[in-house]
Amino acid sequence: MGKIISLVNQKGGVGKTTVAINLSAALGKLGKRTLLVDLDPQGNSSTGLGINKSDINGKSTYECLVGTVRPQDAVITTRFTNLFVMPSTINLAGIDFEFRDKLDADKMFNIKGQLKEVLNEIKRGYDYIIVDCPPNLGTLTMNALVASDALIIPVQCEFFALEGITQLLNTIISTQKKLNPRLQVEGVLLTMLDSRTNLGMDVVEEVRKFFGDKTFDTIIPRLIRLVEAPSHGEPINVYDPENRATIAFQNLAKEVLLRDERD
């Protein structure tokens, strides 16, 4: 049965989507049947894997959440090894209004539990389900927290890296207590490291001091080829197989598997 891991951080620009795409692709390359769920209305995980609007055809995460499409019908098989996508569209930005209408019609409607219901229908078909969350702690992210077994928190190696982390951790603790007692923090992932700067290395030290062994050993570097890859609709392990970022994501995927074996 698929383990559900969400990428969460309410700060934008920390590399959630880059990690979601490339961790999913790396897990697929390691033989794990992996579904990437795009839960961000911007849909960058979808377009970053070459999914276009004609591929979606009214079958996206949004339709699954409002109950007009079966989850299995919204999943797209990509051309990449063992990698599948449940795509997003801008319609997802209106999910709060849809959920409010449903709650008005049915007082028992669970606003925070809809993604869990969607993924419960299909998770037996995958080894991993990776959820790319929007950069906030709103309804969609709360749905991801309730649905998930574990979280990965990307933290950018820049000044104010830990800004807002306390709020995120408090939200996670509250979710564990009230809504999802099985939820765990899989790890904190350092991203966008420019190893040539003292600041980047200072942030690495600060984050590792704060989170201890919850911090992944793998650090995702800031590289031009990694930024270019989504515009070609490919993960980095296909766009540039020998790139340092490809190796980093291979190592991250292996760390995820190793942590799961320990659990």
Image (cartoon, grey):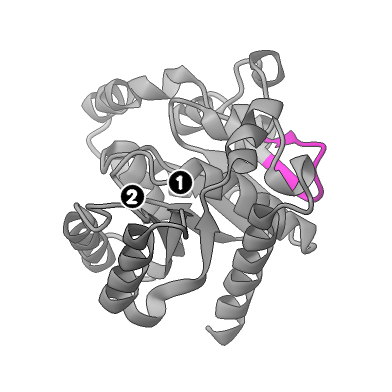
Which type of secondary structure does the marked residue at label 1 adopt? Answer: helix
Nearest to the observer: residue 253 or residue 113: 253
Which type of secondary structure does the marked residue at label 2 adopt? Answer: loop
Residue 161 horizontal side relative to residue 201, left or right: left
Which quadrant is the N terminus positioned in?
bottom right
Check if mark 1's residue and mark 2's residue have beta carbons within 8 Å: yes
Residue 107 position, x and y percent, is 22, 35
Residue 15 position, x and y percent, is 45, 45
Nearest to the observer: residue 143 or residue 245: 245
Identify the residue at horizontal 59%, vertical 48% (top origin).
Answer: 121
| Mark 2 lies on residue | 9
Residue 92 position, x and y percent, is 42, 24
Q: For the magenta stretch, what is the residue range? A: 75-84
Residue 142 horizontal side relative to residue 166, left or right: right
Q: Is residue 133 visible?
A: yes
Q: Earlier in the sequence, mark 1 or mark 2?
A: 2
| Mark 1 lies on residue | 16
Residue 8 horizontal side relative to residue 164, left or right: right
Q: CA distance from mark 1 to mark 2?
A: 8 Å
Residue 202 horizontal side relative to residue 132, left or right: left
Amino acid found under the numbered disc labelled 1 = Lys
Mark 2 nearby-residue class (10 Å; few <14, some 14–19, many ≥20): many
Q: Main secondary structure of the magenta part?
A: loop
Identify the residue at horizontal 77%, vertical 64% (top origin).
Answer: 30
